[in-house]
Image (cartoon, grey):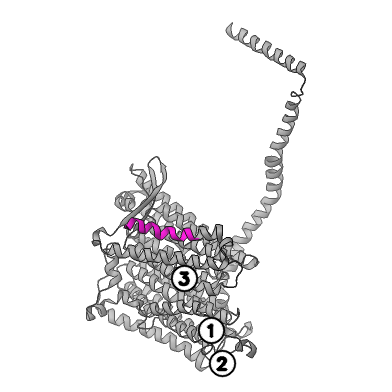
């Protein structure tokens, strides 16, 4: 089977699963729908692995294969093929999407076993994977944008999956509308790039064509602003929406309203990383806009700090992980913003392992605790849920940045790039270090309050706590293994050199990012030591406060300090948006619904045309009365009028 066929199958198999479940799921049975969804994901992953293996057999310079399905748009100089390109970067992404996606599908068999809407659930889940694969494999910006919008739609459907609950439906709408803001800027950036190449007579939106014409983009301007800067900024604003960065991050915490496996797939492993992937894919454009690169790095660093601060005070197990996701995405943007594209993608991969595991572990806890999500009412679950406990510990160890697990290696590489890269600085490195301390603290706070100490729930509830079934714990074990050894994908340069081992991911991505942001500096070991020390400080601090001192967060506002209360209330950002944006828009809507909608739209534009048509029809229908004599009179009168007109005209 050729590479082009394999690439097409990777994308189309999840679409086939979504279609079969969507149209025929109720016929072939609710139980079979889950197995079908898992089967197409397994097949898609197998095709992805085969395609990447085939790609690795090519020379590094020729590792790019395009599969063209059909011509999507053909208008004037714009020709867009529905085409998918497999190269080293998209190869990494499809392995993550299909591999982690398959494990989450399997986990969902147990988690959604008793839900009446599981046919619809698995259809949406397959459809989401299809659009995510379109996004990462798209050979052009319009195809990427199709996937970009598609995952936004599926996110809306899955977040609001239990739409009978008004709060969950509202969360879905919030995610959809917030993403539309970013998507508008993404489209604006895409159009500006096409305009730059169109002016030179070679309008294109294919990634290869844009890169080949980057000299045209570099020369073009939008007013007094270089077009490269304008386009890179617009695309990054789009990324802040999809990847939940300041100021468009507010949708992701509320997105926890969906089923927990949805949180693992969409809001940890795949969709929210789309913005990071897009910046990496367009790295040549961002290299032409150093000011925007600096902005990317600082937005990432500030988001990492801001979200981590909220995570320190959150008490809902999924909300802690939600803000942790926002913070870790900030780390990824810090990496790509300083030019460490390999470091950013590396953290994207390891984050898919340990954060997917954390969300699935949280789902296992919620499942075992019969729906309880408040960590203040947990504790003592270690012996009740041993599989969940040990796998959750691995993931917590990894995200805290403790060696030798995957999160330590990838996070350390980002901090290394932030310090040594020409685009980095001491201030960016310090921001990353502080965020690392906070991450270790709030994650071991979460772990301790959930699993260690004495149970803080009623005895009857605690007696009914149980471990999840094997269909849910086996994916946890697989992800725990990946979280433990995933760092071997890209060992630190000093360690790799000392042990004579390859840096697999750096070597693999070299054709995409041929210029490393930094050479291996002499301070690598010192920076690595600092990274370990800050992770240990956060870990030991959390264990001291919540395990040795047995501190439990309280709900009484009077006992909370002002900073803790502000962090718990998410620094009132949602309230500010509500006052500045939501309420004015709703007020405008109510105004338009009154004098404008009811008086102008309804009465003038909606009611007047049919009233005029009715009046005219009443006049005209009187001529069709069935009276032959009347018809003859009209015919005679018309003939006389025509003859008179012709006589006068010819004269």
Which quarter of the picture shows residue 494?
Answer: bottom left
- Of labels 1 and 3, earlier in sequence is 3
Q: CA distance from mark 2 to mark 3?
A: 30 Å
Depth order, front residue of 284/135: 135
> How many dots with numbers?
3
Which quarter of the picture shows residue 294?
Answer: bottom left
Q: Are marks 2 and 3 in contact (CB under 8 Å)?
A: no
Residue that badge 2 annotates: 454
Q: CA distance from mark 1 to mark 3?
A: 23 Å
The location of residue 607, given as percent across then percent down, is 71, 40
Task: Name which residue lies at 56% across and 59% down.
Answer: 24
The vertical placement of 36 against 381, above or below, is: above
Residue 223 visible here? no
Residue that badge 1 annotates: 467
Q: Which residues are magenta?
A: 1-17
Residue that badge 3 annotates: 268
């Amino acid at each position: 089977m050729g590479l082009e066929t394999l690439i097409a199958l990777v994308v189309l198999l999840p679409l086939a699963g979504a279609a079969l479940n969507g149209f025929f799921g109720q016929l072939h049975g609710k139980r079979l729908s889950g197995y079908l969804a898992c089967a197409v994901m397994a097949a898609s992953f197998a095709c992805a692995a085969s395609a990447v293996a085939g790609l690795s057999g090519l020379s590094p310079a020729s590792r790019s294969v395009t599969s063209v399905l059909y011509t999507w748009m053909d208008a004037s100089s714009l020709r867009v093929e529905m085409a998918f390109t497999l190269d080293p970067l998209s190869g990494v992404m499809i392995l993550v999407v299909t591999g982690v996606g398959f494990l989450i599908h399997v986990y969902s068999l147990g988690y959604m076993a008793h839900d009446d809407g599981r046919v619809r659930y698995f259809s949406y889940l397959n459809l989401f994977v299809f659009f995510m694969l379109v996004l990462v494999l798209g050979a052009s910006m319009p195809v990427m944008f199709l996937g970009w919008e598609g995952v936004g739609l599926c996110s809306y459907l899955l977040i609001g999956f239990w739409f009978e609950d008004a709060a969950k439906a509202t969360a879905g709408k919030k995610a959809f509308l917030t993403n539309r803001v970013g998507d508008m800027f993404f489209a604006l950036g895409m159009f500006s790039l096409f305009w730059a190449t169109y002016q030179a007579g070679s309008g294109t939106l294919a990634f290869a064509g844009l890169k080949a014409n980057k000299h045209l983009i570099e020369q073009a301007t939008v007013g007094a602003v270089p077009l490269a800067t304008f386009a890179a900024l617009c695309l990054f604003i789009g990324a802040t929406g999809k990847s939940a960065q300041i100021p468009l991050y507010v949708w992701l915490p509320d997105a926890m309203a969906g089923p927990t496996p949805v949180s693992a797939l969409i809001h940890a492993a795949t969709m929210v990383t789309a913005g990071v992937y897009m910046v990496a894919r367009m790295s040549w454009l961002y290299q032409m806009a150093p000011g925007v690169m600096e902005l990317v790095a600082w937005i990432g660093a500030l988001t990492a700090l801001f979200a981590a601060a909220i995570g320190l005070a959150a008490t809902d197990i999924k909300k802690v992980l939600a803000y942790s996701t926002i913070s870790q995405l900030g780390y990824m943007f810090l990496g790509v913003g300083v030019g460490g594209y390999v470091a950013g993608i590396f953290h994207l991969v390891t984050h898919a392992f340990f954060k997917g595991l954390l969300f699935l572990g949280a789902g296992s806890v919620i499942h075992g605790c019969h729906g309880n999500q408040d960590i203040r009412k947990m504790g003592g679950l270690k012996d009740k849920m041993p599989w969940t406990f040990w796998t959750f510990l691995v993931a917590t160890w990894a995200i805290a940045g403790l060696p030798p697990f995957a999160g330590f290696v990838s996070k350390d590489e980002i901090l290394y790039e932030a310090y040594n890269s020409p685009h980095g600085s001491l201030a960016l490195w310090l921001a990353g270090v502080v965020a690392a301390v906070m991450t270790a603290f709030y994650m071991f706070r979460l772990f301790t309050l959930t699993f260690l100490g004495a149970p803080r729930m009623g005895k009857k509830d605690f007696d009914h706590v149980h471990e999840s079934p094997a269909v849910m714990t086996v994916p946890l074990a697989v992800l725990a293994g990946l979280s433990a050894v995933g760092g071997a994908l890209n060992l630190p340069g000093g360690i790799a050199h000392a042990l004579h081992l390859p840096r697999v991911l750096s070597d693999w991505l070299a054709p995409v990012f041929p210029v490393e942001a930094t050479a291996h500096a002499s301070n690598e070991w010192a920076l690595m030591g600092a990274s370990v020390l800050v992770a240990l400080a956060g870990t030991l601090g959390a264990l001291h406060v919540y395990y040795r001192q047995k501190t439990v967060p309280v709900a009484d506002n009077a006992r909370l300090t002002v900073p803790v209360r502000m962090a718990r209330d998410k620094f009132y950002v949602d309230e500010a948006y509500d006052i500045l944006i939501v309420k004015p828009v709703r007020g405008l809507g109510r105004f338009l619904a009154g004098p404008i909608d009811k008086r102008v739209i309804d009465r003038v534009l909606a009611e007047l045309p049919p009233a005029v048509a009715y009046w005219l029809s009443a006049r005209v229908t009187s001529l069709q009365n069935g009276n032959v004599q009347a018809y003859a009179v009209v015919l005679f009168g018309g003939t006389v009028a025509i003859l008179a007109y012709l006589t006068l005209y010819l004269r």
